[in-house]
Amino acid sequence: MSININIDENVLLVGEKVITLFLILFAGLAARKLNIIDWAVTKKLSAFLINITMPLLIITSFQLDFDSEILKNGLMIFVVSAVLHIFISAAAYFLYKPVKNSGHKKIYEMSTVFGNCLFLGYPVLKVVFGDEIGVFYGVFYGMFFNLYLWTYGLYLITRKNKKEKNSENSEESKESGKFKIPTSKIFFNIGIISSVTGIIIFISGIKIPGVIYGSAKLVGDMTFPLSMVIIGSLISEIKLKEMFLNFRNYYFVFIKLIFLPVFVALVCYVLKLPVLLIYIGTLMTAMPSAANVAIFAETYGADSKAAAINAGLTTLVSIGTIPVIMYLLDNILKLKL
């Protein structure tokens, strides 16, 4: 599993890509402030992204000549994604023990476990590995992300503390408080369907006709700027003091963007995992919080404002931390990529 990456050059390229995407965030913020879009439109844009642009991005990324080594790499990345998501879930539970407010605690946990590995991770991987192969590898990482989001993520966002459970006196409230896993959404959500479709296309060697492929790729590439517009809209109504004058937010940022990525890199290096797995695992762990968390929070009655703050603040800080993490991989861990 060998890769050849000029990381000195890519540190700068990734930094530029993150800054570019972050600047697009201001388009969403401005549109919301000017009342060009509102919360209802933001939800519709999120649905358009999840159901149209992202599936097309995934499917077109699999238009590669079949290579068993590349497929093997992808499957191993899927396993790494599973291990990392489960490990970070356990770590987050204990790392946020000091947070007394159960509503805030579960938002911090979910924002830590689910990073923006799809909407920001994909373009970063495109810079590092190339247009097609970067998204190809990202899709395998994202497949477990989708599975985990609709199982543990849904459990977490609907989790109630003991006091809340005891306050549910009526049979109706008890019934509504029970956690039910939506099986259909786990295995038949659009992310899994498009990923499996892409893998079948890759293995079978099917080629999408040129005009259709070109159109699909253009729409798929809208995923990246559109995701940042959505995040900009989500944070538009948040007061600056709520984002920047809360110490807990900085503790969260440190855990999410610095502590966990560095810890993952060191553990993977000590275990002597292949360089590709160390690199992708660490880089995806270093992504800012996913906008999905705010969308889930709004849908299931959790603190969507706190989730939006987490997404906005970590996206801002990641402009500096993602290139630094890449630099550490090469110069501190002495990985020869």
Image: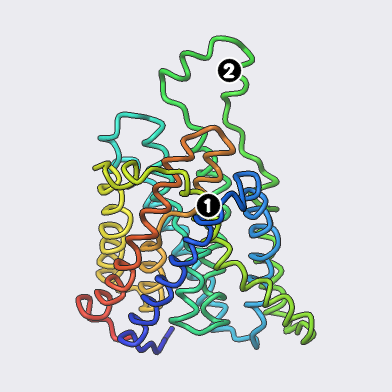
Residue 43 x/y as whole percent: 63, 48
Residue 263 x/y as whole percent: 26, 61
Q: Which residue is mark 1?
A: 233
Kindly tell me whether residue 148 is visible in this rendering. Answer: no
Label 1 crowding class (10 Å Cα cut-off): few <14, some 14-19, many 20+? many
Q: Nearer the viewer, residue 114 or 214?
A: 214
Q: Which residue is mark 2?
A: 174
Choose mark 1 or mark 2, whichever is in front.
Answer: 1
Tags 1 and 2 touching, CB below 8 Å: no
Q: Nearer the viewer, residue 337 or 252?
A: 252
Label 2 crowding class (10 Å Cα cut-off): few <14, some 14-19, many 20+? few
Above or below, 219 relative to 229: below
Above or below, 273 relative to 40: below
Q: Does dot 2 land on a helix, a strand or a loop?
A: helix
| Residue at (52, 50) in percent of width and height | 33
Single out the residue that lies furthest toward the top: 169
Above or below, 233 relative to 1: above
The picture quadrant where one finds residue 282 is bottom left
N-terminal of the pair, mark 1 or mark 2, is: 2
